[in-house]
Amino acid sequence: MTHRITSPVRVVWDWNGTVRDDVADHVAALNATLPALGGRPVTIKDYRAEHRVPIRAFYDELLGRTITDAEWQSNDTAFLAALDARPVRLRSGVRQLMMHLRARGIGQSLLSLAPHDRLQREVHRVGIGALMDRVDGRHGPSVTSKAPALAAHLRALGPDIDPARVVVIGDSCDDAVAARAVGAFPVLHTGGLHSAQRLATADAPLVDTLAEAVETGLAAVAARTADTP
């Protein structure tokens, strides 16, 4: 007897550090706001070694103390304003890669823990919104994990979505944790917000380009969901 899989293969993209090439932007925005908290500037190497979710814990680690609610709210607003002042740059070749996937009939969506309204503006500003079946950002305060958001994202895409046929492409250990939590396959890109050394602890394929990420993920999904007698 053969089990026939009808759910389409799908790619779920992360935004910051993955599709958006913005590590330098994040470091610049962070360094513009840290002095108000008594912090010292950080390098890109420092940032990629220490960045984590929830972001508030990241600040605690950088400052060596627990920031207050008022400090967090004020700094978060200032950080996002500094980030918004910088142009949105896509990673090289990603638009063409997305168009190629669309031509192959592979569904794509985008999920981020960035604020939803800002994410929507940025995605449509760079002209890739029409290539996505869905774009979801964060509603409400910062969270400790992307897993609940990914589960909700897949549910919103429709009842025919089989997580086993979903490739999650991101740049953080949490992307891998979230993918495995819902039964999807993670692939991590080494040029984003987390260093390759940190990503190596996530037990997921590591690649240097998004084209490699796509092909690695699609090959893995094809292998894991192949029809078996």
Image (tube, rainbow, N blue to C red):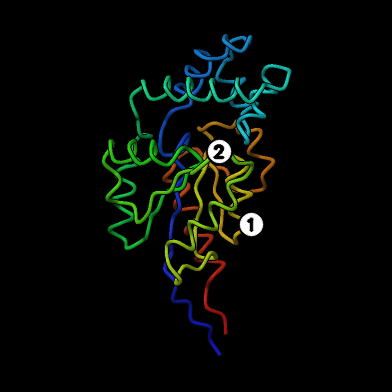
Query: Which amino acid lies under the numbered mark 2 shown in the image of this protein?
Result: Pro
In the rendered structure, which disc, 1 or 2, sits on the residue that comes first in sequence? 2
Left or right for 94, reference 35: left
Query: Which amino acid lies under the numbered mark 1 shown in the image of this protein?
Result: Ala
> Which residue, given by chain and number where applicable, does mark 2 sit on?
141
Which residue is more in the foreground, 144 or 131? 144
> Which residue, given by chain and number where applicable, does mark 1 sit on?
181
Residue 60 image label:
none
Task: Give residue 105's quadrant in the image.
Answer: bottom left
Which residue is more in the foreground, 176 or 208? 176
Q: Cβ–Cβ below 8 Å for labels 1 and 2?
A: no
Residue 190 horizontal/vertical position (percent):
54, 36
Residue 76 horizontal/vertical position (percent):
52, 25
Identify the secondary structure beneath mark 1.
helix
Position of residue 83 relative to residue 148, above or below, is above
Measuring 43% from the left and 64% from the top, which residue is drawn there?
9
Identify the secondary structure beneath mark 2.
loop
Task: Give residue 171's quadrant in the image.
Answer: top right
Task: Give residue 173's quadrant in the image.
Answer: top right
Residue 198 horizontal/vertical position (percent):
66, 34
Measuring 35% from the left and 34% from the top, which residue is drawn there?
90
The alpha-carbon separation of the residues under discs 1 and 2 comes to 21 Å
